[in-house]
Image (cartoon, rainbow, N blue to C red):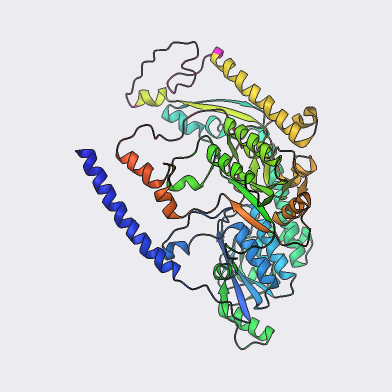
Amino acid sequence: MKKFLIGLVAGAVLAVLTGVILLFALARAGASVPEVRKHSVLVLNVQGPAPERAPMAIPFPGLQKQAPLTLQQIRNTLAAAAEDSRIEAAVLFPRGVEAGWGKMQEIRSGLLGFKKSGKPLVAYLRNPSAREYYLATAADRIYMSREDFLNLKGLRIEAMYLRDTLDKLGIEVEIESAGKYKDAGDTLSRTSMSPETREVLNSLLDELYSHLLETIAESRGQSVERVRETMDDGPFLAKQAVDAGLADGLLYEDEIFEQLKAELGRDELPRITHRAYSAATAPSPLSSRGSKIAMIVGSGSILPGSGGGGLGDEEGIWARTFIRVLRQVKDDDSVKGVILRIDSPGGDAIASDEILREVRLLRQEKPMVVSMSDTAASGGYYMAMTGDPIIAYPNTFTGSIGVIYGKLVLKGLYDKIGLRKEILTRGRYAAIDSDYTPMTEAARAKLREGIDAIYEGFLDRVAEGRNREREEIEPLAEGRVWLGVQAHRNGLVDELGGLDRAIEIVKEKAGIAAEETVQVVTFPRQRSFWEYLMDQNGSSLLSSTMRKLMGGSTFSALKDGGILKIMPYQLEVR
């Protein structure tokens, strides 16, 4: 009776929710396409993340407007505006940018492409950090308000270590890894950086900082040494930024548009946001714009299985789901070529191998190129080993060819809270992954056997994919993370560039004329909220929610443990 009542209430709630969604969907369907007026200024509000693929389509207009544009949408908007005679200028408003340094290179490249059209590109900064300023350097002029603050002072990497904290809690961490740089477990097992970690992170920071200094120097007409000296004086008050040659003037937002009116000789300059412009210029789903290129996006950690159908399942590369997408593209005769777009720090070792197998089958049917985003490391690098050309940004995090296993021993914590376990086993290694007992030396040796075997396989896959001898790969492995520019020097990637270069290569491989316009179609396609509710595969939000309400124990979370091909650390350079 209790389950019946729970189901009845849940059904009623979902019925009301469905009705509300339908009303909003009908209202949205009746909304008009934004108009692009003559002599318009494109307003580029670049903020938050720049996801590789569109998140779930939300039928509530207010919420949908908050969804970030994808990296490809930003790129397409800038390219279209550069050729659109109705757009006479653009004003960039970067704020709270969360994209990584690889994606920012793609966005900045798009901004430079717009500027080449000869149309004015002006940047207006509000409380900017290094990320926002980096994008602004693509503009003809950079402005700030009089009372603002330029938080430009260099770059830093912070690494956190929890060993002392875990000791106080009575938690022991056991880590086994293949590769001296494969230090993902160090956060839990050490109190400070290892010499290997310090070496790698300093190397990455040096490259990123040099790139930032060179970019600023070129855009501001200064020497690298002068910019380096200036950076040591940051952060800057707005007037100090102007005096240092980092900004061109102190204006309010309305003054920028008045200045553009005078510059272009217009009495009026209608404004259109990049979101509205993207909607206005988006091609009809029924229109044909030349040969179709599939851009298959693998974004997030690599996970086994198909996911649980919850709202967070858009994040992550779920092996079985991703394989279905690969097969869908392989069977689509209208697809003439494939860009495998990777933004992943790696994850489950077995899932990574399953995906690589399916990608290799796909590349036998379709011309392919691999394009790396912010991160394509460890399992993310592994799945790129198809033998096809690999394109990375200079600031992409990649490599990390290594393997790790770790488990938490919680007996000390259990003792503190009065919890006791008794373990009965059959089999010598039955308790190897128990959270109550540490591994014996024999168990550790058994585990190392598996880790070493997977690491050897990783080296073999990289040697095959890069068409090199294994002996050449081994010194570049050991779990070490490389920036794209370093990986290119070491032969781990083929070229430095972004989506434009990837499209050029796949067109050449597919025999498509260089001047032909192609459709770049993103897979997996964007799903609607309604599809989440009513998915026929039984993994929808509706089915998963109902089963949880009805007490189904088989729909559990991701299985704990496992051997991982995952990046040693999550890097955020600020």
Q: Is residue 1 visible?
A: yes
Q: Is residue 183 visible?
A: no
Judge left or right: residue 497 versus residue 313: right
Q: At 41% from the left edge and 22% from the top edge, which residue is drawn?
A: 411
Q: Nearer the viewer, residue 95 or 371?
A: 371
Quadrant location of the N terminus in the rendered image: top left
Q: Decide whether residue 12 is among the magenta residues.
A: no
Q: Where residue 114 appears, x then y in whole percent? A: 70, 69
Judge left or right: residue 360 versus residue 325: right
Q: Decide whether residue 430 is among the magenta residues.
A: yes
Q: Where residue 500 appears, x then y in whole percent? A: 72, 57
Main secondary structure found in the magenta portion: loop
Q: Over which residues does the magenta segment extend?
A: 417-442
Q: Quadrant of residue 550?
A: top left
Q: At 66% from the left edge and 73% from the top edge, which residue is drawn?
A: 122
Q: Quadrant of residue 90?
A: bottom right
Q: At 44% from the left edge and 23% from the top edge, which residue is drawn?
A: 435
